[in-house]
Amino acid sequence: MTRTKPQADPLLCAVAVAQGRVDQPDALFAALDEAVKSAIGHKLFTILTYDGDSGEAARIYSNLPGPYPTGGRKRLAPGPWTEAVLDRGEAYIGRTQADLRMVFSDHELIASLGCESVLNMPVRWRGRTLGSLNLLHEAGWYGEDDVAACLPFAQLTLPALLAPAHF
């Protein structure tokens, strides 16, 4: 019997290796940024944590810290987006600027960065959404195949979200 040689995904491996580095969570977030950009693509990439008790989201990583600095917080209003992404743990795909306008109060800033589509990928643990990877790009960039491609990267974020300090 001949065994086929196992093939590791080099992008997932790079993220996994970054998890073992001392300079956390910076090493992990930078590796995720690069891997997701290569695998799926983005112009803007952020990582948010969610506090179910306060109803707030906090930005713990941004590849564009000028317009989207880390530490930014916002209260999340109940609605279809929060029910899907936060409550049910479903990815959200917005394909057009109109989609973003319906969901995000900062849609004008998003558009000014050349972004008209979004993939919000929840990070889940024990049936709860602890955070999300947020990828934004030109109109029509994201589709259902990107959800499956993004899932392993999102879940590799979990140790940083479970750690006592996110910064």
Image (cartoon, rainbow, N blue to C red):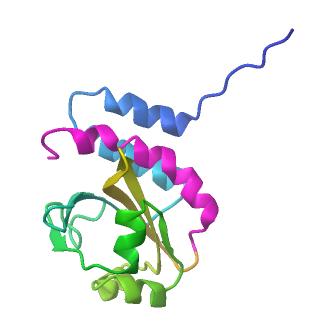
Establish if 7 lies above or below 102.
above
Main secondary structure type of the part rendered in magenta: helix
Judge left or right: residue 50 versus residue 40. Answer: left
Residue 84: x and y in percent read 42, 69
Q: Residue furthest top?
A: 1
Q: Is residue 148 magenta?
A: yes
The residue at 51%/84% (across/down) is 96
Judge left or right: residue 61 versus residue 114. Answer: left
Residue 143: x and y in percent read 60, 68
* Depth order, front residue of 85/10: 85
The residue at 47%/91% (across/down) is 98
Residue 81: x and y in percent read 39, 76
Establish if 112 lies above or below 69.
below
The residue at 39%/46% (across/down) is 32
Q: Residue furthest right?
A: 1
Q: Is residue 146 visible?
A: yes
Q: Is residue 158 magenta?
A: yes
Toward which corner of the image does residue 77 lie, by quadrant? bottom left
Count of marks overlaid on the render: 0
The residue at 20%/69% (across/down) is 66
* Depth order, front residue of 87/141: 87
* Depth order, front residue of 87/155: 87
Judge left or right: residue 145 versus residue 129. Answer: right
Quadrant including the N terminus: top right
Q: Is residue 44 visible?
A: no
State the extent of the magenta-drawn residues as a range: 141-167
* Depth order, front residue of 127/110: 127
